[in-house]
Image (spheres, grey):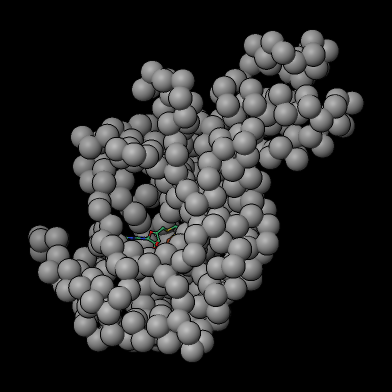
Amino acid sequence: MTVNLLNFDLEGLTTYCEQLGEKRFRAVQLFRWIHQRGARDFSAMTDLARSLREKLPAQARIEGLKMLSRQDSADGTIKWLFDVGDGNAIETVFIPEDDRGTLCISSQAGCAVGCRFCSTGHQGFSRNLTTGEIVLWQAEFFLRQHLKTSERVISNVVMMGMGEPLQNYHSLVPALRVMLDDHGYGLSRRRVTVSTSGVVPMMDRLAQDCPVALAVSLHAPNDALRDSLVPLNRKYPLSELLDACLRYLPAAPRDFITFEYCMLDGVNDQPQHARELLELLRGHAGRGVPCKINLIPFNPFPDSGLLCSPRPVVQQFARLLTESGLVTTVRKTRGDDIDAACGQLAGDVLDRTRAAERLAQRRVSSVHPIRFAAPAGDKQT
Ligand code: SAH
Ligand code: SF4
């Protein structure tokens, strides 16, 4: 079996080339061919020593994911479904804006955290993606061809697709390094965001190994409510999570943490929740956590049993936070017509952990006052 070179960051590729008896600068050349020019054919790499060009095909390959489908939204958003084997599929979304091109990528096939409002969580967990399955290669070079440009198309990356990135740390960090490397995609650390449901020890490690912008999925202002929405909270409760945010900040490329808060009708969207959130974030550790809040209107999916907060409720919640000085934005929904919004990225997952089953049981036995959706036909906002 040949080695897929997409799985290496530059350091890994250098070690690999050294094992083949090649010098470090050859690894840089090879890396640039792959990640700056999208090459997959060794014979086209004209400045590589002929001996290396001839050696590589027998032992290495450059192989992206197999595309199962592509959907183009009227607003320019593109969603791909990629095959990752064994009946698993993952989704990737490209969101073009005037001044940037953002790619939303996945880190796992499924997710073991099992958040109640998340379609991925409902499907359970199959496996971690490899570094090569996480990196931008596929999307970037498809987009360059599609948009007929030789310029870089993707300027921002958000790890907000399927999976919990910090539960796939060993593949995540080399993938981030490829994105940031000047010989790779050369993205700024501020424009690469890891979103986490709060894997506290790995937040500390990320601060050391590869600090990028951090988004933390909060969704609740107290432990009782967060326990019921984000099960990981039972392991790493809010005070520990916020402490980890404070420890992350000195290494972070931005001087704030983004807190994501999914607006769920009647569950976490009331004025008292906003007040409690203010108190929590302002008062933590006696000095508060420098942050911005991003309210995400809940994107419904079949069997979630939840509804999105009505628009005036979202606006009132945002106003309460803003008036007290917390910078708060409401996430725009893009790619609505192709189900490309947060939490709707379903893919197709072979659940190996029975997480989906456990989640279903928890829903039945939970005593938490989640307000379940009205019968079908009730209008979503
Ligand atoms: N596992 C990571 C990153 C992937 S989820 C995390 O949880 O942060 C990316 C974001 O989408 C998270 O903030 C998550 O809470 C949010 N999300 C999940 N399901 C959603 C849904 N149905 N509607 C709106 N946002 C959702
Ligand atoms: Fe996993 Fe994030 Fe979905 Fe929670 S919200 S189940 S952590 S992907």
Quadrant location, the C terminus: bottom left
290 displayed left or right of 57? left
Q: In the figure, 249 relative to 5: above or below?
A: below
Image point 23% across, 71% down: which residue?
A: 318
Q: Position of residue 74 (x, y in %)?
A: 21, 35
Q: Position of residue 86 (x, y in %)?
A: 54, 42
Image point 48% across, 84% down: which residue?
A: 287
Q: In the figure, 372 relative to 56: above or below?
A: below
Q: Is residue 338 visible?
A: yes
Quick one: 69 or 325, which is closer to the camera? 325
Quick one: 168 or 206, which is closer to the camera? 206
Q: Position of residue 329 (x, y in %)?
A: 28, 62
Q: Position of residue 64 (x, y in %)?
A: 56, 30
Residue found farthest to the right: 21
Image point 75% across, 34% down: which residue?
A: 13
Q: In the figure, 229 relative to 125: above or below?
A: below
Image point 45% across, 39% down: which residue?
A: 155
2 displayed left or right of 71? right
Tell me which corner region of the image, top left, top right, bottom left or bottom right, holds residue 1.
Answer: top right
Q: Is residue 303 visible?
A: no
Tally the numbered discs: 0
Tell me which corner region of the image, top left, top right, bottom left or bottom right, holds residue 204.
Answer: bottom right
Quick one: 359 or 142, which is closer to the camera? 142
Tell me which corner region of the image, top left, top right, bottom left or bottom right, holds residue 52.
Answer: top right
Q: Quadrant of ligand 2?
A: bottom left
